[in-house]
């Protein structure tokens, strides 16, 4: 479901925002998928094999990322690995037209440790029921879908920051020189955009999370993922982390 963005789209605030809106659908559908399985705590806590220090979850993530790295996933500046130190080289250097857009000093910003931390410790307990059905591999695959979709969304903040800087370098330059994080945060924040996002993602979760059959009005008021949790996910984690990425990127923009 991940869509790639062309280099023209990556340099335009309107199309970046459209991409963020499309990514809401992907994120919500993946959360609905994960909510099918119970919490399955052993996946995260038990070691994957005698003598190994990794959980099955860590094993699944590192091995999948290694495979995807070989196939060229992390050649794209829109992709950020959860275990960047363990990646093999890509087999082919895929041509990627968006490589040059980001300022080199900010291109390697990676907040995936913060993303996996809120996902595992805060979000999973809110979207899954307690229990263990033993479906660990499918659960780990579903977790990775959610994590990669969230990571892609949040790290798009680098491109948003680049565009905002290019659109108004005179506004951002003094705050960057002064390393004034608060001033940068204020400059890049659009409260009305954020309000619309919180409402829209709750609406989407309401619509996507219903059982649909042949009758028109068959809603029983039950949703596969609680719409207010999705709104909270955006308010407390997704948008603040996107803005954190934007500030971190801007701080390095003139290096
Ligand atoms: C991403 C942007 O920057 C900020 C972060 C937002 C977000 O994470 O969705 C929305 C509006 C801005 O406050 C943007 O301006 O679109």
Image (spheres, grey):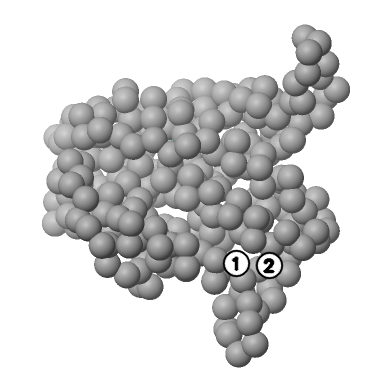
Task: Tell me: residue 126, above or below residue 112.
Answer: above
Mark 2 touching mark 1, by CB under 8 A? yes
Query: Is the residue marked by circle 1 packed among few (<14), some (14-19), or many (20+) residues within 10 Å?
Result: many
Circle number at residue 29: none
Report which residue position mark 1 lands on.
57
Cα separation, mark 2 vs mark 1, equals 6 Å
Q: Closest to the observer: 66 or 236? A: 66
Query: Is the residue marked by circle 2 packed among few (<14), some (14-19), or many (20+) residues within 10 Å?
Result: many
**On the rendered structure, is 146 left or right of 85?**
right
Report which residue position mark 2 lands on.
43
Instruction: Say which element carries label 1.
Output: helix
Residue 198 location (% of width, % of height): 57, 29
Q: Closest to the observer: 250 or 45? A: 45
Q: Closest to the observer: 189 or 71? A: 71
Image quadrant in which you'd find residue 168: top left
Q: Residue at x 83, y 16 (%)?
A: 218
Task: Tell me: residue 68, above or below residue 48.
Answer: above
Residue 4 location (% of width, % of height): 34, 37
Task: Tell me: residue 219, above or below residue 104.
Answer: above
Residue 237 appears in the picture as rendered? yes
Q: Residue at x 74, y 35 (%)?
A: 224
Image quadrant in which you'd find residue 90: bottom left
Residue 180 appears in the picture as rendered? no
């Amino acid at each position: 479901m991940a869509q790639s963005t062309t280099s023209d789209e990556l340099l335009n605030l309107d199309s970046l925002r459209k991409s963020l809106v499309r990514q809401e659908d992907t994120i919500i559908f993946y959360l609905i998928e994960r909510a099918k399985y119970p919490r399955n705590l052993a996946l995260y806590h038990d070691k994957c094999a005698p003598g190994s220090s990794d959980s099955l979850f860590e094993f699944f993530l590192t091995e999948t990322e290694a495979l995807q790295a070989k196939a060229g996933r992390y050649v794209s500046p829109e992709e950020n690995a959860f275990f960047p130190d363990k990646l093999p080289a890509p087999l082919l250097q895929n041509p990627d037209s968006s490589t040059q857009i980001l300022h080199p000093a900010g291109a390697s910003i990676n907040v995936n440790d913060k993303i996996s931390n809120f996902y595992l410790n805060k979000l999973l307990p809110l979207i899954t029921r307690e229990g263990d059905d033993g479906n660990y591999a499918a659960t780990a695959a579903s977790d990775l879908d959610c994590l990669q979709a969230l990571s892609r969304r949040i790290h798009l903040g680098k491109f948003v920051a680049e565009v905002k800087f290019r659109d108004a370098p005179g506004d951002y330059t003094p705050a960057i020189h002064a390393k004034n994080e608060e001033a940068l945060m204020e400059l890049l924040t659009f409260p009305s955009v954020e309000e619309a996002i919180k409402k829209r993602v709750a609406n989407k979760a309401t619509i996507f999370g219903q059982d649909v059959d042949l009758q028109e009005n068959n809603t029983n008021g039950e949703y596969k993922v609680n719409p207010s949790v999705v709104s909270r996910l955006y308010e407390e984690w997704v948008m603040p982390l996107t803005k954190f990425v934007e500030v971190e990127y801007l701080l390095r923009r003139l290096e």
